[in-house]
Image (cartoon, rainbow, N blue to C red):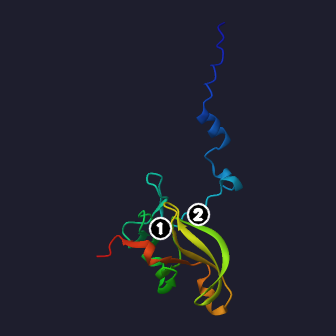
Amino acid sequence: MLRCSPPDPPPTTALTCVLRCFPCEPTWAGSPFLHRPPTPPMVRMTRSKTFQAYLPSCHRTYSCIHCRAHLANHDELISKSFQGSQGRAYLFNSVVNVGCGPAEERVLLTGLHAVADIYCENCKTTLGWKYEHAFESSQKYKEGKFIIELAHMIKDNGWD
């Protein structure tokens, strides 16, 4: 009687080690080491360009004037009547491709606020700030919103 021996195991490669450690299953998504913020529904993530998120091309958008990274969708614009350190600025509900520095208290034209400078994730230019906390009740609507100065952004897609 002829007995077959089991086949030799395939050689171990770096990829097989990674796949064993980090399986493609939702069970590892909750790991604190692999935290990824949820992607806003209107944003398509990509790795083919130098910045991370692209806003849909069917919408009017604002981009960084220095590197053209998308910053905000026109639908997220709350107000055009703000003043930044370098002139006029716009208030947005949400932004993309933006990093946030540490919060600090500043006395602005409308009173005391805790704000954090925001910068373009691609070219690292300071764009404006994020309102972390408003100390006056009439200014609470600004909390969690973003100021981008006009000196640092341009209009893209469909502004004709």
- Residue 86 lies, in percent from the top left, at 48, 79
Give the Cα distance between marks 2 and 1.
12 Å
In this view of the protein, which residue sits in the foreground, 136 or 126?
A: 126
Q: Which residue is mark 1?
A: 42
Question: Mark 2, residues whose alpha carbon is within 10 Å: few (<14), some, or many (≥20)?
Answer: few
- The residue type indicated by label 2 comes to Pro
Q: Quadrant of the C terminus?
A: bottom left
Quadrant of the image occupied by residue 67: bottom left
Q: Residue furthest front?
A: 86
- Residue 66 lies, in percent from the top left, at 42, 65
Q: Quadrant of the N terminus?
A: top right
Residue drawn at the location 69% of the way across and 53% of the way down = 33
Secondary element type, mark 2: loop
Secondary element type, mark 1: loop
In this view of the protein, which residue sits in the foreground, 1 or 99?
A: 99
In this view of the protein, which residue sits in the foreground, 149 or 21?
A: 149
Find residue 38 and name its label: 2
Quadrant of the image occupied by residue 107: bottom right
